[in-house]
Amino acid sequence: QVQLVESGGGLVQAGGSLRLSCAASGRTFSNYAMGWFRQAPGKEREFVAAIDWKSSTYYADSVKGRFTISRDRAKNTVYLQMNSLKPEDTAVYYCAASQVSYYRGTSGDFASWGQGTQVTVSS
């Protein structure tokens, strides 16, 4: 059974940093794209970042230059380093594993999801 477990969320002041981790188990994800999504209260879930099997990275415009996605294949873990955080980054952040190797610009490829971790940025 595929399992994704996020950690690293919390409360931080604007301008601060957090590092989210997503530990995967149940299968090896190194040959598949992985992604981070977020959902703020009253809003739809939105794409944040993705990394494909070659470690090419993709970002939403709203986080480009501030967030960095990376993966450790040996640990089957994906990270999201978040710097210069803003109050509008407040959301529940979800890790997701794709069924394909490349990121194709759609969340529909992501079949496995974690339970989410809360990130709150105070002004």
Image (spheres, rainbow, N blue to C red):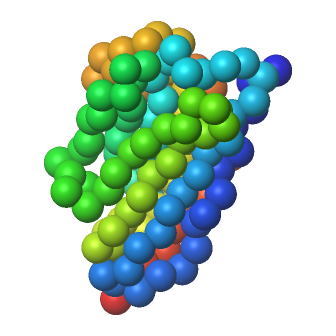
Which residue appears farthest toward the right when viewing the image?
1
- Which of the two residues, 55 or 111, is positioned nearer the viewer here? 55
Is residue 95 toward the left or the right of residue 107 in the image? right
- Which of the two residues, 42 or 36, is positioned nearer the viewer here? 36
Residue at 39%, 45% in the rendered image = 69
Is residue 2 toward the left or the right of residue 67 in the image? right
Is residue 10 toward the left or the right of residue 43 in the image? right
Which residue appears farthest toward the top when viewing the image?
100
Residue 99 in the image: x percent, y percent? Answer: 53, 13
On the image, which quarter does residue 77 sit in? Answer: top right
Residue 41 visible in the displayed image: no
Total marks in image: 0
On the image, which quarter does residue 4 sit in? Answer: top right
109 over 76 or under it: above or below: above
71 over 8 or under it: above or below: above
Which residue appears farthest toward the front when viewing the image?
74
Residue 17 visible in the displayed image: yes
- Quadrant in which the C terminus is drawn: bottom left
51 over 59 or under it: above or below: above
- Quadrant in which the N terminus is drawn: top right
Residue 113 in the image: x percent, y percent? Answer: 62, 33
Residue 119 in the image: x percent, y percent? Answer: 51, 67
Residue at 45%, 35% in the rendered image = 35
Residue at 36%, 15% in the rendered image = 102
Residue 103 in the image: x percent, y percent? Answer: 34, 21
Residue at 43%, 42% in the rendered image = 70
